[in-house]
Amino acid sequence: MPCRRAFFLALLLLVTAALPLLGGCNCDGENAAPVGLAPRKVSAEPAASLDQRLVDGNTAFGFMIWQVLLDKEEHHNILISPASISTALAMTANGADGATFREIMETLRLPGMDLEELNAAFADLQSVLRNSDPEIELNVANSLWARQGVSLNEQFLQRNRDYYAAVFDTLDFEKPAAVSTINRWVEQQTGGKIKKIIEDPIDPLTFLFLINALYFNGAWSDEFDPQNTREIPFTLSDGTRKDHPVMFREGAYRYFQGNDFEAIRLPYGKNRRVGMTVFLPAADSSLVEFQRQLTPENWAEWQLSFSEMDGKVGLPRFQFEYEVSLKEILRTMGMECAFEPRRADFSRMISAMPGPYISEVKHKTYVDVDEKGTEAAAVTSVEFRCTSARPDRFSMIIDRPFFFAITDEKTGAILFLGSVNNP
């Protein structure tokens, strides 16, 4: 796959991370199907400002994940949504305590926040996301799906309702319909672009899926004329060339010439606050070399370096999907206890379940860029399991030889012991 094209996807990482700060969306968790415990209605008024710790932490968190993935897949297309991942982990933090909670906060790069500050900051972030732009659609939806018969702590559920507008439902995980129900919700929330996040059958020890879904559809502020799109040679990372359709347009854009790269910002919508920023490494450099410079510090400096300039841009059309397990990546970032059955502390989520822990964090994304704009979607699923099964019901048919005892419960005295081989 084209290495440079992979970088354009890095851009979606940055755009998605920046969306909460830029506004311009149409988001309402209440668009989710009304199942189980519905979210409370939240104010449509955007917050006047966001907690700067959340802004800085989300940026650092996104770049950290990106660099870990880059070490493994530097010559492949990559696409992640830091906003989706961080929201799912923030919801998870409401069920964690002790070292497990501290490690989640450190992994999110928010070690100075307590739980109430975390929830308030994410609630403000979502209120900014609801500040709509008529030409941009941004849907953020959250949900919790528990095994039938499992009782989650009410305070855990309430916080996720109040701050994250999450819907909650219980399902019979033994039936294939449970998988279909969850995947159908995911498909609805992502505009049909991501159709599956849960696999059938569900593990018998799994008792909860916590899911964030994000969908973005934005029209360019200045669309590309399809008549100007033409195929030109595109040089791959190994030096080979292939013809690929590239969209061309001339106009005034925010542009920046850096060391060994140039960058342009392509805005979306009517108010132009949301945009895609494309970075192109110099011909004598490479995408790999450029991506080594992707740090929160450099990113902040670059954002102050753009200025309006007339020029011409040629942007390749592209479309692809991406899927990754974040379990080991989050471990390397410091989130260890949550994945260990004997160390995880999710007592704020559930108290009766033996040894609850996170068994998997799955992330799926989709992107399509053409002359009209950009359509992108992301889903993050956090799967929780217990260390042993606790059956919700039983069926005991005594149709073979058996043993019995008659005891005095008050004294513990055994009055009779017996076995029956032939009743």
Image (tube, rainbow, N blue to C red):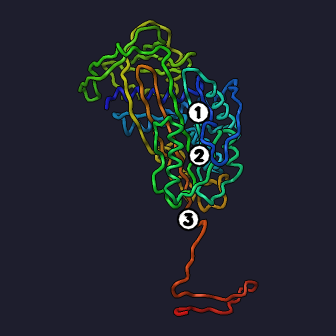
| Nearest the eye: 3 or 105 | 3
Secondary structure of the residue carrying tag 2 is helix
| Nearest the eye: 34 or 351 | 34
Answer few, some or many: residues within 10 Å of disc 3's Cα (few below 14, many 20 plus, some between 14 and 19): few
Residue 88, image quadrant = top right
Q: Position of residue 305 (x, y in %)?
A: 50, 14
Question: Taking the image as drawn, is residue 102 in sight?
Answer: no
Is 375 located above or below residue 390 in the figure? Answer: above
Q: Earlier in the sequence, mark 2 or mark 3?
A: 2
Residue 404, image quadrant = bottom right
Please name which of the two marks, 3 or 1, marks the residue nearer to the observer: 3
Q: Earlier in the sequence, mark 3 or mark 1?
A: 1
Q: Position of residue 300 (x, y in %)?
A: 53, 22
* Label annotation for residue 57: 1
* Residue highlighted by disc 2: 103
- Label 3 and label 1: CA atoms lie apart by 37 Å
Secondary structure of the residue carrying tag 3 is loop
Is 280 located above or below residue 214 in the figure? Answer: above
Is 166 located above or below residue 417 in the figure? Answer: above
**Label 2–label 1 contact, CB within 8 A:** no
Q: In the image, 180: left or right of 285?
A: right
Secondary structure of the residue carrying tag 1 is helix
Please name which of the two marks, 2 or 3, marks the residue nearer to the observer: 3
| Nearest the eye: 331 or 152 | 152
Q: Position of residue 148 (x, y in %)?
A: 60, 58
Residue at the location (70% across, 46% down)?
158
Q: Amino acid at mark 2?
A: Glu
* Residue highlighted by disc 3: 389
Q: In the image, 290: left or right of 213?
A: left
Residue 286, image quadrant = top left
